[in-house]
């Protein structure tokens, strides 16, 4: 048995974050969505995604009957149990959509089947709560619920590493969990609104102030004096300083200096220059619109607070100012005075004064240097994905 996590028609709606990964590789809490399915089900996991991503994210090897699941769904205990109870020829439905299919080894549901399950399949109704990450802003919106459920999964029946007496805990100390090698010194940790999870080898430096729910990934660092308002989640090897509110950084990215990041999602291998700030609230206090690659225009988010969405390997220069609801593509390099455009394509180079294409050869060299600093190689498959995205999105001369 195995689980196939399908993009299920959501891939374009989650760009630029999914230019370089399947939907189920997003990390809204402590774990990637796919990791949550693997840990909770105990089954092998694979992906049905865009053709150019498939070599990096293959299908599961097993040829036995499988479950095909909407990869945008958070794997709650109830949902995982419901999926594992369906059989070939059945479809689990909820919220008017297909959530999962029971399939034989040679079957594959079409994209349209997710929105309108075929009548020849036996519907099985799921009555539990469905937590879906089908738009970029859902990632920070539902981050707190994801952290809480991941925290319970990873810590139940286990004992935290001891927390230094030099720290101050406001709320329940039992909601602070330090994995092996984690270091937290002379900081304030408030768990009244949710848990605080500190991963293997992670460090919270002196003077940090944390209000849960917060997740700090393996070997990540919170710099001295960082102020972090939950729900916020930082993946492995992140470097985070300054002020952060309700934001998610998928991993391996740097916001190491003063400056504000709010209601935002950053991909991997990003770097925000010193005093980079983003707006998360319009001066009119109106609803924020965000560019959608799927619709090719700005769409309503229904949110008053909404900040920055940045694809992998994107960078900002010092003192960069991002407007409310800005979307920055993969490998973009943004700098200069004034507010840049709210929509910056992948591999764009520049800012408010204009954009040009970032040469792909130089971009690949830079990506390799950045990854080597964390002792991660840029593989041939990684490079092929970057070149493909450059061909899709880079500004034309």
Image: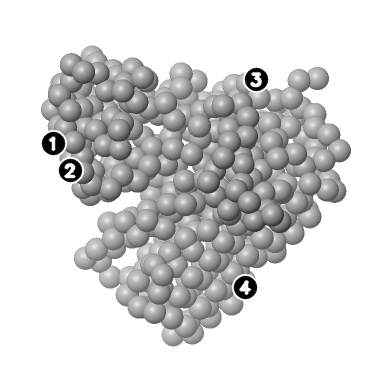
| Circle 4: element type | loop
Q: Foreground residue, 310 or 273?
A: 310
Q: Nearer the viewer, mark 2 or mark 3?
A: 2
Residue 159 appears left or right of 137 = left
Q: CA distance from mark 1 to mark 2?
A: 6 Å
Which part of the image, by quadrant, shows the C terminus? top right
| Circle 2: element type | helix
User: CB under 8 Å between callouts 4 and 2?
Assistant: no
Q: Earlier in the sequence, mark 2 or mark 3?
A: 2
Q: Foreground residue, 366 or 208?
A: 208
Residue 2 shows in the view: no
Q: CA distance from mark 4 to mark 1?
A: 48 Å
Residue 304 appears left or right of 27 = right
Crowding near the residue tagged with mark 4, few <14, some 14–19, many ≥20 C-alpha atoms within 10 Å: some
Residue sitting at x 76%, y 27%: 357
Q: What mark, if any, has residue 85 been given in the picture?
A: 1
Q: What mark, if any, has residue 125 been given in the picture?
A: none
| Circle 1: element type | helix
Q: CA distance from mark 4 to mark 3?
A: 41 Å
Residue 259 shows in the view: yes
Residue 109 appears left or right of 58 = left
Q: Nearer the viewer, mark 3 or mark 1?
A: 1
Q: As drawn, which residue projects farthest toward the bottom?
A: 165
């Amino acid at each position: 048995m195995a689980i196939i996590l399908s993009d299920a028609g959501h891939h374009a709606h989650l760009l630029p974050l999914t230019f370089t990964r399947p939907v189920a590789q997003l990390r809204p809490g402590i774990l990637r969505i796919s990791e949550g399915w693997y840990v909770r089900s105990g089954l092998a996991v694979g992906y049905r995604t865009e053709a150019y991503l498939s070599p990096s994210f293959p299908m599961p090897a097993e040829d036995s009957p499988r479950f095909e699941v909407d990869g945008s769904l958070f794997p709650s205990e109830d949902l995982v149990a419901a999926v594992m109870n369906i059989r070939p020829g059945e479809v689990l439905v909820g919220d008017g959509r297909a959530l999962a299919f029971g399939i034989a080894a040679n079957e594959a549901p079409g994209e349209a089947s997710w929105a309108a399950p075929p009548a020849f399949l036996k519907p099985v109704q799921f009555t539990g709560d469905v937590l879906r990450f089908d738009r970029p802003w859902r990632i920070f919106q539902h981050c707190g619920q994801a952290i809480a459920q991941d925290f319970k999964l990873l810590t139940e029946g286990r004992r935290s590493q001891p927390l230094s007496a030099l720290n101050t805990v406001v709320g329940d100390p039992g909601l602070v969990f330090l994995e092996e090698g984690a270091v937290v010194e002379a900081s304030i940790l408030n768990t009244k609104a949710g848990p605080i999870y500190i991963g293997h080898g992670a460090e919270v430096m002196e003077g940090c102030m944390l209000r849960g729910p917060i997740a700090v990934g393996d070997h990540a660092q919170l710099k001295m004096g960082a102020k972090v308002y939950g729900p916020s989640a930082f993946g492995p090897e992140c470097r985070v300083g300054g002020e952060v509110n309700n934001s998610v950084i998928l991993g391996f990215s740097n916001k190491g200096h003063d400056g504000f990041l709010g209601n935002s999602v950053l991909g991997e291998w990003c770097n925000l220059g010193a005093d980079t700030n983003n707006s998360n609230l319009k001066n009119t206090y109106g609803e924020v619109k965000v560019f959608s690659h799927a619709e090719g225009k700005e769409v309503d988010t229904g949110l008053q607070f909404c900040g920055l969405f940045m694809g992998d390997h994107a960078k900002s220069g010092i003192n960069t100012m991002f407007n409310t609801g800005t979307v920055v593509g993969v490998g973009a390099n943004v700098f200069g005075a004034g507010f840049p455009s709210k929509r910056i394509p992948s591999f764009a180079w520049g800012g408010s004064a204009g954009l040009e294409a970032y040469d792909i050869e130089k971009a690949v060299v830079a990506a390799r240097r950045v990854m080597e600093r964390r002792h991660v190689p840029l593989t041939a498959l990684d490079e092929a994905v970057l070149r493909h995205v450059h061909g899709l999105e880079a500004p034309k001369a």
